[in-house]
């Protein structure tokens, strides 16, 4: 599943990235494989999405979130 598919309040663990060009940028922002991530909210039109990761809040565009592969936490 991709991070862009999660709804507000859902939690997941980052598994991998599918785009090597954006991979480094996302890792510099704290999106590391194995890190827990929670979707906090979405903008009214759905883009961007606000996520909580590593103790801080991060806003990601949907095209960035679409490159993050996650496993949801039940």
Image (spheres, rainbow, N blue to C red):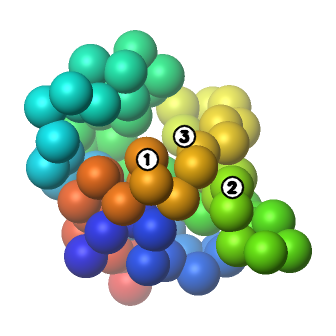
Relative height, residue 45 to residue 33 (above, below) = below
Residue where numbered disc 2 is placed: 48
Residue occupying the point 59% across, 45% down: 60
Q: Residues within 10 Å of mark 2 (few under 14, many from 20)?
A: some
Q: Residues within 10 Å of mark 3 (few under 14, many from 20)?
A: some
Relative height, residue 23 to residue 51 (above, below) = above
Q: Nearer the viewer, mark 3 or mark 1?
A: 1
Q: Residues within 10 Å of mark 1 (few under 14, many from 20)?
A: some
Residue where numbered disc 1 is placed: 64
Q: Quadrant of residue 66?
A: bottom left
Provide the secondary structure element on which disc 1 rests. helix
Nearest to the observer: residue 17 or residue 13? 17
Q: Position of residue 74 (x, y in %)?
A: 38, 84
Q: Position of residue 44 (x, y in %)?
A: 86, 74
Provide the secondary structure element on which disc 3 rests. strand
Q: Is residue 34 left or right of residue 72?
A: left
Nearest to the observer: residue 59 or residue 34? 59
> In the image as oriented, which residue stretches furthest toward the right?
44
The disc, 2 or 1, on the residue closer to the chain's N-terminal end is 2
The disc, 3 or 1, on the residue closer to the chain's N-terminal end is 3
Distance Cα–Cα, label 3 vs label 2: 15 Å
Residue occupying the point 44% across, 78% down: 5
Q: Quadrant of the N terminus?
A: bottom left
Distance Cα–Cα, label 2 vs label 1: 9 Å
Residue 74, numbered label: none
Residue occupying the point 58% across, 49% down: 61
Q: Position of residue 31 (x, y in %)?
A: 38, 34
Residue where numbered disc 3 is placed: 53
């Amino acid at each position: 599943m991709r991070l862009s598919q999660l709804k507000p309040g859902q939690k997941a663990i980052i598994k991998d990235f599918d785009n090597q060009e954006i991979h480094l940028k996302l890792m510099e922002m704290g999106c590391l494989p194995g890190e827990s991530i929670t979707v906090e909210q979405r903008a009214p039109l759905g883009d961007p999405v606000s996520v909580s990761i590593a103790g801080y809040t991060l806003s990601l565009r949907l095209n960035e979130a679409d490159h993050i592969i996650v496993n949801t936490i039940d």
